[in-house]
Structures are given as C-alpha cells and as structure tokens.
Amino acid sequence: MKLYSYLHSGKALVATDLLTHTQVLNHHVSILTDPSPTAFSQGLLELINNPEHRLALGRAGKNLVEEEYSYTAFRRKLDDLYNGLAHEFVHDSVPSI
C-alpha cells in the first residue's frame, strides 16, 4: 500500500526489480534496480544527476495512481463490472423466439 502513496507524491522512486514491486511499478514510473547496494545506489545517482528524468518519473507515477488506483478509477472499474454483469443478465434472461 505504501507504493501508491509514494507514487502519488509525485516524487521519483527507486525500487528493487522484484515481483513485490513490479506488480505496480515499471520502468516508466520508477527506476528498478537489482537488489544489491551497488545497483540501488546507482539508481539513486541516476535520479540525482538527471533532474529531467527525475521529474518525468514523478509525474508518470502520480498519473498512474490517479488513472489506475484512485477512488475514481475504482468506481469506473466497479461500474464497468456492474454494467457488464447487467448486460449479461439481460441477455441471458431474454427468452429467444
């Protein structure tokens, strides 16, 4: 759950390239490194030395949260589910002639 808050902050993230992180993160919204101190520090240095990339990752992360993981996105997905179920129910319950 912390990843969503971190992304929504608009700050660039450096994380290890492990399944626990890549279920949400990707190279478009974060820097993913091997899980070693050297690789992680290189990811941090990349952000320090490249302010444009740092800002772009921060914006992309914030957009990802707002588009896919916000309350509005949840409501949209839930509405789509209900509409799909209603459509299936109506088509399945109409007798064929």
Image (cartoon, rainbow, N blue to C red):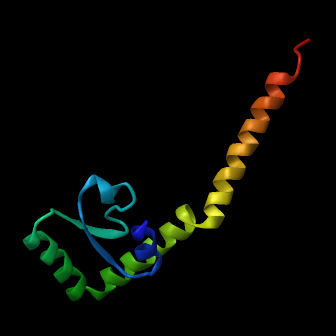
Dividing the image into 4 quarters, which one contains the C terminus? top right
In the rendered structure, the answer to whether residue 35 lies left or right of residue 78 reads left
Residue at 16% across, 72% down: 40
Relative image position of residue 25 (x, y in whole percent): 36, 62
Q: Position of residue 13 (x, y in %)?
A: 32, 75
How many numbered badges does the structure rendering display? Answer: 0
Looking at this rendering, what residue extends furthest in the top direction?
97
- Residue at 38 percent across and 82 percent down: it is 11
Residue occupying the far left of the picture: 38
Q: Residue at x 81, y 27 (%)?
A: 91
Please indicate whether residue 18 sits to the left or right of residue 7 in the image. Answer: left
Q: Nearer the viewer, residue 77 or 56?
A: 77
The residue furthest front is 1
The quarter in which the N terminus is drawn is bottom left
Residue under the image location 13 percent in, 77 percent down: 41
Depth check: give the residue in front, 8 or 53: 8
Q: Is residue 33 above or below residue 83?
A: below
Left or right of 46? Residue 22 is: right
Against 9, residue 16 (above or below) is above
Q: Quadrant of residue 48?
A: bottom left
* Rendering coords of residue 46 (x, y %): 20, 80
**Residue 87: x and y, percent?**
78, 35
Q: Give the quarter of the image for residue 53.
A: bottom left
